[in-house]
Amino acid sequence: MDKRTIEVCFNPENLEYFDISNSHVIVVDVLRATSAICAAFANGAKSIIPIPTIEEARIAKEKGYLVAAERDGKTLNFADFGNSPFNFTADRVAGKDIAYSTTNGTKAIVKASDGLSVAIGSFLNLAAIAKWAKQKQTGNVMILCAGWKGRFCLEDALFAGALAKILLSDSCFTTHSDSVQASLQLWSLAQGDIFAYLELVAQRHRLKKLGLDDVLEYCFTPNSTDKVPELVDGKLVVL
Amino acid sequence: MDKRTIEVCFNPENLEYFDISNSHVIVVDVLRATSAICAAFANGAKSIIPIPTIEEARIAKEKGYLVAAERDGKTLNFADFGNSPFNFTADRVAGKDIAYSTTNGTKAIVKASDGLSVAIGSFLNLAAIAKWAKQKQTGNVMILCAGWKGRFCLEDALFAGALAKILLSDSCFTTHSDSVQASLQLWSLAQGDIFAYLELVAQRHRLKKLGLDDVLEYCFTPNSTDKVPELVDGKLVVL
């Protein structure tokens, strides 16, 4: 049987250059959207609806949804809260449907929907998302990084490397991708002391300026949840 | 005085997400377009005209230009030769104007023309292009990788890392860019044994399949020429 291939796309804007029709797509936006989504399901959220535009988020609020929405790290004024994972507490989200719009993350989720299936990955569910990908048994794996406004982001590449390393330890997977190789190598440099390494990451400094970098330890601590959010009929749910 | 910043864009398709109006742009397509361009000028070419489309390359041929044109590594049937640096020999190119069209490289050159200035970089002219960037004295530096059909290419990132390392050793330069950090780190892993490292590079294997990987040693040997091709009025020339 042909091996299943692993690919990494560093930005949603580049996804059109890949054929993902036979790929399970894992969307990654470590700082902070996909970490927040994993936190929400860990805390009992019922569903999360990815909302690309601010206007659609506003309409969702008028319809009575709980709305999490930010641009450039700042909570939109009509939203219930922004995209710090710490906002998605059990008392707020348990049993709720949440409309969620972020600078880079939701765009990536929408673009991913041409794949065989779409799931949400972060360090919070690293082992679980790897298990999810393995259990699919057929189909390739595309790790889709949200990046930052069309640009490469180190923190997403690190996660891609960590996940690719786990998958490639299973002989059913292979890769022919330079972006996978680069991600593996960057992860190999970072994994020994991830918090020292994070000093290099631009988004860490963007968040620090906004006083929003309190999430770093939480976002880079692996395997705090076994929940794998999947996109089903336009909603993220845990099956 | 503010420091001059260094940025790396891994694909021409992502250049629109950067403001390059105050940047000198260095275009890189190590395997093989910008290595070939540096080889052509080292061998006395008068000018090279970047031609984006096959149809425009065909028209250039009808007008009597020497035409170098390939797609996916294969020479187009109407062209005089393809884009192996070994084609651009002194007996063929000295004193000549060459129309040149490649899969990824010429697209990058055309997109770069919104910058303050545009020059061609490869390992062949690594020290010279670094000196060129330093001598500009003002303006930022954008290292624009040609990539491969919208995807990340390791060999271009390695060059970006090698060049960024030289520039950042000068205190007038700084960076806040994740793609620069990643390039520096990948270069740090590769530079000790570049030819062993190249086994990881996908384009190396694409070229090998086509019997075109004879150029590897030539393309990764630094500083065989001090010529810096620059874009002036739509033509590459050495000033």
Image (spheres, coloured by chain):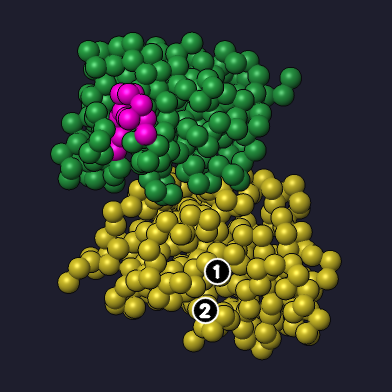
Chain colours: A yellow, B green
> Circle 1 sits in a helix, a strand or a loop, which is it?
helix
Residue positioned 37% across, 34% down in the render: B59
**Any part of residue A203 in sight:** yes
Residue positioned 59% across, 64% down in the render: A107
Where residue B196 sits, quadrant-wise, is top left
Find the distance from the CA under tag 2 to the CA under tag 1: 8 Å
- The range drawn in magenta is B59-70
Residue positioned 27% across, 67% down in the render: A4
**Residue that carries the numbered disc 1 in the rendered image:** A109
**Any part of residue B204 in sight:** no
**Residue that carries the numbered disc 2 in the rendered image:** A231
Residue B67 sits inside the magenta stretch? yes
Q: Amino acid at mark 1?
A: Ile
Can you say whether A102 is above or below B84 in the image?
Answer: below
The image position of residue B105, as x and y in percent, is 40, 36
Can you say whether A178 is above or below B63 in the image?
Answer: below
Mark 2–mark 1 CB contact (< 8 Å): yes
Can you say whether B200 is above or below B141 in the image?
Answer: below
Q: Amino acid at mark 2?
A: Leu
